[in-house]
Amino acid sequence: MDTAQRERARTEARQEAARLGGEGVRAIALTWVDNAGITRVKGVPTGRLPHAAHRGVGVSPVFDVFLVDDSATTSRHIGGPDGDLRLFPDLDRLTVLAGQPGWAWAPADRYDQLGQPHPACQRQFARRMTERAAGRGIELRMGFETEWTVLRAPSAASTSDSDHAPDVAPLFVPDRPGAGPAYGMARLVELSAYLDAVLAALVAQGVEVLQIHPEYSPGQFEVSVAPSDPVGAADDAVLVRETIRAVSLRHGYVAAFGPVVEPGVVGSGRHLHLSLWRDGRNLCRGGEGPLGMTALSEAFLSGVLDALPALLTVGAPSPASYLRLEPSRWAGAFQCWGPENREAALRFITGPPDEPDAANAEFKCFDAAANPYLLVGAVIAAGLAGLDAALALPAPVTGDPVGQDQPRLPTSLPRALARFTASSVLREALGEPLFEAFAAVRAAEAELFDGTPPAELAAVTRGRY
């Protein structure tokens, strides 16, 4: 970021600060997502926005090796208490937060003290991969479905069992409002005021909502938003989650985004939809490949499907993710694809014949423990590798893949991590500092939770993301 860019940002930030001040906004939350999948934040008073846009806000690089429990590991390039980075807000995404009166939000990019991009900045990685695809004449449109479970905090009576120490309290299965039938109207009726508030907040923030509805498990809901460019889709994923969190708290609930609330119950994913475009044409439609895909689209999706065992480390990064990735739960536990197949890791959606824009691919095996910036960037890298190799999709799968001799995706984080660390495609795309720091966090979390019983693993992770 050069001097002229920073001066322009300061001028724009002055105008924005005046506008926000007039709307009663007193502070701006500047966020980034770390390698543990946690959204971290620095807040600045509205009057300090011009300074933040010009000089940045200080933040330690050690966050790149933080774990989900806020402990830290280290890596070959990043770790320890030394050094400093600067957070620069993206003023184009500056948003007044409808669920947090007095606050606005902006995602931030991280730079070093000399104004050079931080090599482990996940948001800038997503931007680099988007630009790499654009260099091939490919525009990616992406969007996330966010699933969450509505919880009430355990009552004092439910956590005061004299046979257990106080630190066992999180193991109690929480009360879940909206526990009516799966996908049932009864559940929506019970929480209609709450869901209306979620929808109203998202709309007020400029997020285009496509669907909002009950999901399978008790107290579970889903919201789908319109596609955007990859960085914008990742920004939206952050904004959607934090908006749901804020609205939930204002209604006396807790929103749990962890992969599972309790073992044995269908968990929460954060599915990624994507389509490829060139010159205004959807490349997922109108070709001679499977289900009408163009050769470009088929090769790209083949690259992602081929890389899924490694990508799972990015998209399903928690040890708890593998409590969710079970067969016959629509979680995408098998490395296969199929037309409208909700059990396949890759569900291809052709859309109605008269809506060519609707054709897209959905990756079902990812969840909200993932850093969305890392995920969209890694998916693009894998897809471009598929283009380079001119890959073709295997035969599609119909029905439940169980018993059909389909390859199972890794069933634990260590197994997925082994595939990630062996991936030359992802190592090159991420660059050594980011690749090594991310791998170190994943290895440390695998060790942290090694041997943890499933019920405890679910309990200690469900509310962290």
Image (tube, rainbow, N blue to C red):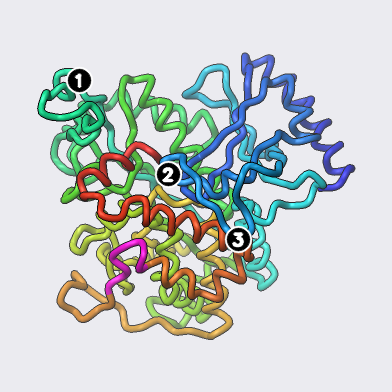
Q: Quadrant of residue 162?
A: top left
| Mark 2, residue position | 68
- Residue 245 visible? The answer is yes
Instruction: Say few, some or many: other residues with alpha carbon within 10 Å of mark 2 (under 14 / 14 to 19 / 20 or more).
Output: many
Please tell me whether mark 3 sits on a helix, a strand or a loop.
loop
| Mark 1, residue position | 155
Instruction: Say few, some or many: other residues with alpha carbon within 10 Å of mark 3 (under 14 / 14 to 19 / 20 or more).
Output: few
Tell which tag, 3 or 1, sits nearer the viewer: 3
- Residue 217 highlighted magenta (yes or no): no
Instruction: Say few, some or many: other residues with alpha carbon within 10 Å of mark 1 (under 14 / 14 to 19 / 20 or more).
Output: few
Q: Quadrant of residue 410?
A: bottom left
Residue type of the residue flagged with mark 1:
Ser
Disc 2 to disc 3, how far (Cα)? 20 Å
Residue 295 placement, left or right of 428: left
Q: Quadrant of the C terminus?
A: top left
Q: Is residue 244 above or below residue 193?
A: below
Q: Position of residue 407 (x, y in %)?
A: 28, 77
| Mark 3, residue position | 76
Q: Which stretch is magenta? A: 408-415
Q: Earlier in the sequence, mark 2 or mark 3?
A: 2
